[in-house]
């Protein structure tokens, strides 16, 4: 049953002239997520611009049992930000809630509304001579609220942690419309349950995050990058350990890439150049950064020492240090475009997994062998945040294979990969979340006790199940 027109009119009246649209041309971009996997329907998109307006809209929906799908930049990859096809769920977009509430330089915090774009958050921090370390490939459109709701990871987790580690306080509209004023800049507050952690990573199923107080850090005064060839993932893990020790913990990024992924980039993406003359099976892109002046710590000397030691130990086969910003950008393009470049190679089967860093070589050996038993000519493109144990374990269809025949093997491949991940003490979703895509997987691998606790929390906070229903937990 679709939503009655009387409710549509009432919600539009609450939201005001600029706060709602039932025009399908306006609605359409909000229905399709980046991989075109989930395409839903909705009769209405709401665009509130204050927390009070969000509260009033949610109260009306609560009183009338209307389902809400909170949405930020719509960059999610697991169906957590898309309505279903029933046409009975409205989208509540946070894009108009994009104000800076506070900048506290001495406390090293900034308080932003959830519709602030991540790239703009970087600029806001830079203008007060600070640094906000969350970096994602989608940072030009991803928003702070979505980053928090999905507990985003990105390239700097090695040094700064995931989004959960960067949030000090939240403002949240609960499913009944009440506002939790939990914005705080405190690093220490031992007064009972730390409620913010209920909403971080909950994918909008427990409430709507409207603002957050975030940690910021001293601005980087030096940054050095290196692109190196390695023999295998075992060498990568040993290089990681050595680099962290030598760098004085200034290593902020450590990304692994296979040769096939580099070739996909060179073939399909502009702005990419092969950094090395010779081809190798595996590469590492690593970066050190510090807020120290060069006279206190010369990062160029540090990076040279890392590479010199690595070459002596046989961990690095070849490498290059970029000489300028353009060369550095080219190296990061090779990493950031890797997933996008796969789109030009036909269908993909993708995984966002994590295992303990020490288990990565074993996972790669077993995972690649197991998948190749299912499809011998499959094209593996495993890449990502090896420094924190997160691998985007992706596969492109064989050149000669029918697309649908390839995709039909998806469930078997997913089960095979996830079984190995869980056996090694890992996670089936490192940074993308559960959404609707991984509901069955979550139920397969989580214990009855864990699932029960999650359902109890959902039932307590959202007894009518109006907030992003069918995501994370059934």
Image: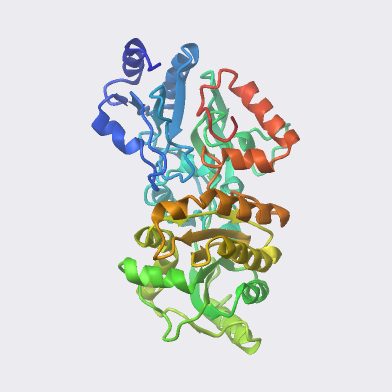
Give the vertical position of 169 relative to 234 (above or below).
above
At x 75%, y 34%, the residue is 449
For residue 181, what is the image quadrant? top right
- Where 140 falls versus 275 (above or below)? above
In the visual, does 78 lie left or right of 117? right
The front one of 431 and 131 is 431
Whether residue 407 is visible to the viewer of this picture, yes or no, is: yes
Which one is nearer the viewer's eye here, 278 or 184?
278
Quadrant of the drawing holding the C terminus: top right
For the N terminus, the quadrant is: top left
Q: Nearer the viewer, residue 351 or 241?
A: 351
Q: Residue 56 in the image: x percent, y percent?
A: 44, 17
The percent position of residue 361, horizontal first and vertical second, equals 66, 69
Expressed as whole percent of the image width and height from the top left, the position of residue 116 reads 41, 42
Rendered image quadrant of residue 270: bottom left
Q: Position of residue 442 (x, y in %)?
A: 63, 41
């Amino acid at each position: 049953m679709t939503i009655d027109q009387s409710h549509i009119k009432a919600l539009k009246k609450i939201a005001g002239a600029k706060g709602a649209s039932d025009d399908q041309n306006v609605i359409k971009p909000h229905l399709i997520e980046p991989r075109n996997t989930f395409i839903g329907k909705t009769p209405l998109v709401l665009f509130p611009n204050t927390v009070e307006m969000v509260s009033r809209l949610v109260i009306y929906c609560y009183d009338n049992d209307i389902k809400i799908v909170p949405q930020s930049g719509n960059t999610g990859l697991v169906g957590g930000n898309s309505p279903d096809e029933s046409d009975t769920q409205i989208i509540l977009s946070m894009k108009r809630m994009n104000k800076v509430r506070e900048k506290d330089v001495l406390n090293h915090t900034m308080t932003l509304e959830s519709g602030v774009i991540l790239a703009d958050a970087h600029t806001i921090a830079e203008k007060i001579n600070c640094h906000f370390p969350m970096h994602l490939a989608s940072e030009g459109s991803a928003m702070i609220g979505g980053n928090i709701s999905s507990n985003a990871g990105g390239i700097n987790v090695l040094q700064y942690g995931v989004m959960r580690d960067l949030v000090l306080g939240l403002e949240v509209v609960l499913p009944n419309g009440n506002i939790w004023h939990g914005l705080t800049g405190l690093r220490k507050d031992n007064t009972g349950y730390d409620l913010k952690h209920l909403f971080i990573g909950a994918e909008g199923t427990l409430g709507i995050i409207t603002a957050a107080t975030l940690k910021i850090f001293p601005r980087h005064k030096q940054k050095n990058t290196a692109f190196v060839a390695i023999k295998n993932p075992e060498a990568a893990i040993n290089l990681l350990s050595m680099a962290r020790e030598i760098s004085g913990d200034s290593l902020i990024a450590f990304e692994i890439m296979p040769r096939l992924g580099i070739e996909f980039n060179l073939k399909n993406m502009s702005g990419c150049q092969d950094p090395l003359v010779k081809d190798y099976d595996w590469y590492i892109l690593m970066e050190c950064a510090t807020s120290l002046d060069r006279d206190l710590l010369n990062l160029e000397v540090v990076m040279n020492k890392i590479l010199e030691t690595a070459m002596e130990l046989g961990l690095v086969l070849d490498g290059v240090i970029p000489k300028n910003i353009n060369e550095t950008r080219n190296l990061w393009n090779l990493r950031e475009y890797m997933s996008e470049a796969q789109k030009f190679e036909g269908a993909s089967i993708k995984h966002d997994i994590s295992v303990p860093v020490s288990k990565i070589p074993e996972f790669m050996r077993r995972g690649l062998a197991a998948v190749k038993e299912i499809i011998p000519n499959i094209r593996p493109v495993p890449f990502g945040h090896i420094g924190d144990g997160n691998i985007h374990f992706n596969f492109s269809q064989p050149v000669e294979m029918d697309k649908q025949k390839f995709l039909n093997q998806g469930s078997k491949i997913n089960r095979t990969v996830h079984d190995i991940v869980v056996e090694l003490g890992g996670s089936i979703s490192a940074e993308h979340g559960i959404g609707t895509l991984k509901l069955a997987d979550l139920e397969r691998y989580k214990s009855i006790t864990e699932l029960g606790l999650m359902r109890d929390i959902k039932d307590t906070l959202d007894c009518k199940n109006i907030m992003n229903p069918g995501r994370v937990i059934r």
